[in-house]
Amino acid sequence: MKKALVKSGLGLSVVLFLLLPSLVFAEEAAQPLDLKTHFVGYFAVAMTVFVYILAMTEDMTQMSKSKPMVLGSALIWFVIFLFYYIQYGTAEAAVASFKSNLTAYAELFLFITVSMTYLNAMTERGIFDGLRILLVNRQYNYRQLFWITGVIAFVLSLVISSLTVGLLMGYIILAIGKDQPKFVGLAGLNAVIAANAGGTVSPLGGISTFFVWQQNMLHFTEFFALTIPCIVNFLVPAAIMHFSVPAETPTFVKETPKLKRGSVGVVLIFILTFSITILSNVFLEMPAIAGMMFGLALLEFFCFYLTKSEKVGCDESQKGFDIFKCIAGVDWDTLLFFYGAMMIVGALSFLGYLDAMAQYLFVEISPTLANTLIGLSSAAIDNGTLMFAVLNMHPDFPNGQWLLLTLTLGVGGSLLAIGSAPGLHVLGLMKGVMKEGEGYTFTFHLRWMPAILLGFFASIGTLFLVNGGAF
């Protein structure tokens, strides 16, 4: 028993020693401290690197990316709170920082949840299956389908989260080109690039763009300046890939689209929701989530009406549906991943790392070069996490630099298959459907990286050309 007590006491002493700072005393006020060279800071950095490696290698480990991120964020904040309580007996500064990051995440969580709920509702009503049938019935050749699916991905990602657009377009492309692996690979890649480019133009479609809008760094209408650069980003690699797309026409048996009752109503409420969200933000300065939640309420009541007004014995297409099943069907792994990522970034900011990084990036290096390098790094690191990190650095940017950062982070993820949510979704969709090494794969994407990189720099050049006065 004595030995156990001695060991416990020794262990506690070691923990206390590690947590005590060398130059900070208990009588100081409980303010945020610079802990970059303290054990707490080293632990946070090591844990961040470790969990990000696990998240980025989910295909090899077969472990969903949210698990290490949520656990890592919890451990980092636990150590921070423990340090403050040992040092001061209170953790008010840490509590304030934690709640601030949690509030930012809550808005993102609700925004994505509503967006995905609409996507699931439209899928349940057969709208996207009808789109697939429409494309097949028109007997387009593969090159036409390559451009049509790319343009649809770009347009949809203006109003629907690009990560869900990637999944949707991957499904349609697979259904159309299942017998032509080369088309599936090229069209899948094209859809990923288009979804990232379209999501960059609009805060409704891109996570990093949403963060800039959420923090009021740019007003909604100011993002329109990214329209032409993002179109260039999509068109340059697409034009290069066009000549590699098979020219033949797929043969399919014609089908009749079967839209379920209320499908048009769901689309109209979807349009109304995003119209209210944008207009209330532009003219009333209401947070975006207020309009989104209003739209979700409208959708819930519409689903209630469909269910209550269905006739006894009607066929499946005439029945209503449960909106809460659509809510439950959102991508929880992605939502929880963003929780972990945002809380980790908030912790690193609280510990002083992001301020030091901002000093190096935006003072010692020019903001233009720094924003370009940050955009290139989004090829391997989630762009939403990077944008949240930059926002926590509080750089003093003119509008032009915010536009540049939004552009490079939004389209930089297209450089690698693992660099963006649409890419990861399409990769996951190909598993078990295409043969090993066929269709859209990591190595297939990598082979086209030079063309995508050309589009990346062409979009930056276009931004300076059309909006140079804002820099």
Image: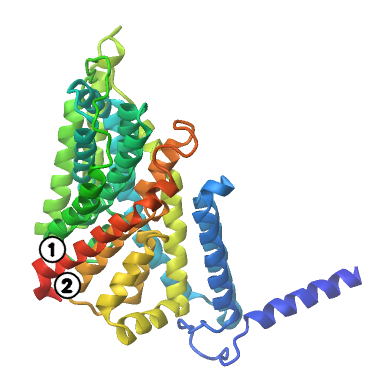
Looking at this view, is 456 or 15 the one in front?
456
Determine which residue is flagged by label 2.
399
Extreme-top residue of the structure: 313
Residue 81 visible? The answer is no
For the point 57% across and 93% down, which residue is it? 23
Task: Give neighbour class at mark 2: few <14, some 14-19, many 20+ (Cα, 10 Å).
Answer: some
Is the Cβ of the residue at disc 1 closer than 8 Å to that at disc 2? yes
Q: How many marks?
A: 2
* Amino acid marked by disc 1: Glu
* Amino acid marked by disc 2: Asn
| Mark 1 or 2, nearer chain start | 1
For the point 40% across and 36% down, which residue is it? 328
Left or right? Give the position of 35 relative to 430: right
Report which quarter residue 381 is drawn in: bottom left
| Coloring basis for residues | rainbow
Quadrant occupied by the N terminus: bottom right
Looking at this view, is 409 or 284 the one in front?
409
Determine which residue is flagged by label 1.
222
> Tag 1, which secondary structure?
helix
Residue 443 rendering spot, x and y as whole percentages: 44, 49
